[in-house]
Amino acid sequence: MRTPTAAARKNDEDDYVTDWNAENATMIALNGADASIDGTGAEAKDGSVTITAPGTYVLSGKLNDGQIVVDVQDKENVRLVLNGMELQSSDSAPIYIKEAGKAIITLQEGTANTVSDGKTYVYPDASADEPNAAVFSKADLTVNGTGALIVHGNYNNGIASKDDLK
């Protein structure tokens, strides 16, 4: 097990920021089997949402069997504001931070948010073994805010990060 250094344990200023502005955010409304997006940097397709640009993304509603994938190639920060959302995936990580400089999950004050994965995952090939948690990140991951987050890690872990987790 890796023991973090003092520098790794230190929080950055943006680890504490919980406020956001609707004018500068992309709003993602989860609608059962799909999602609607108001803003830029994200695309909804086949029950999943892929985020490809840095910025703030506000998620609300319910997605019955889908995934939020963060794949920001330029290594900048992505903030996911969970604003009363329920997200389930039957065969993978409902929240998958594939690539970003840092991902910050903010739990909006006064909201309850639920993330659940299935008991089995489907990988592209036999050599793959990740993601393997309901909230899985390959980048630094910070969770902040005063809202509630309920994570049902049915496959393996509830929250896992291959990098720093704060």
Image (cartoon, rainbow, N blue to C red):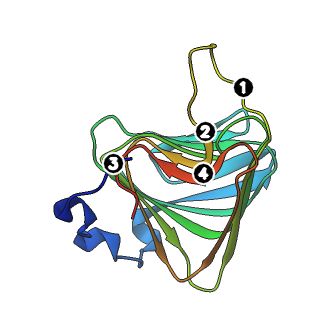
* Dot 4 or dot 3, earlier in sequence: 3
**Discs 4/2, front:** 2
The residue lying at 59 percent from left, 80 percent from top is 147
Q: Which mark is residue 37?
A: 4
Mark earlier in primary sequence (1, 2): 1
3 vs 2, front mark: 3
Amino acid under disc 2: Asn
Point out the image quarter for the C terminus. bottom left
Label whose residue precedes the other's in the sequence (3 or 2):
3
Q: Report how far apart the C-alphas of labels 1 and 3 lie in the structure.
A: 28 Å
Q: Position of residue 42 (x, y in %)?
A: 51, 44
Q: Which residue is mark 3?
A: 2
Q: What residue is shown with label 1?
A: 122
Marks 1, 4: nearer the viewer = 1
At a point 26% along the width and 70% down the height, the residue shown is: 11
Labelled pair 4, 3 in contact (Cβ < 8 Å): no
At numbered mark 2, what does the secondary structure look like: helix, strand or loop? loop
Disc 4 on helix, strand or loop? Answer: strand
Q: Nearer the viewer, residue 116 or 67?
A: 116
Asked whether the residues under the numbered discs 4 and 2 touch, taking CB atoms below 8 Å apart as contact, a structural biologist would say no
Residue at figure coordinates x 65%, y 23% from the top left: 123
How far apart are the alpha carbons under marks 4 and 3? 39 Å
Front-most of residues 133 and 20:
133
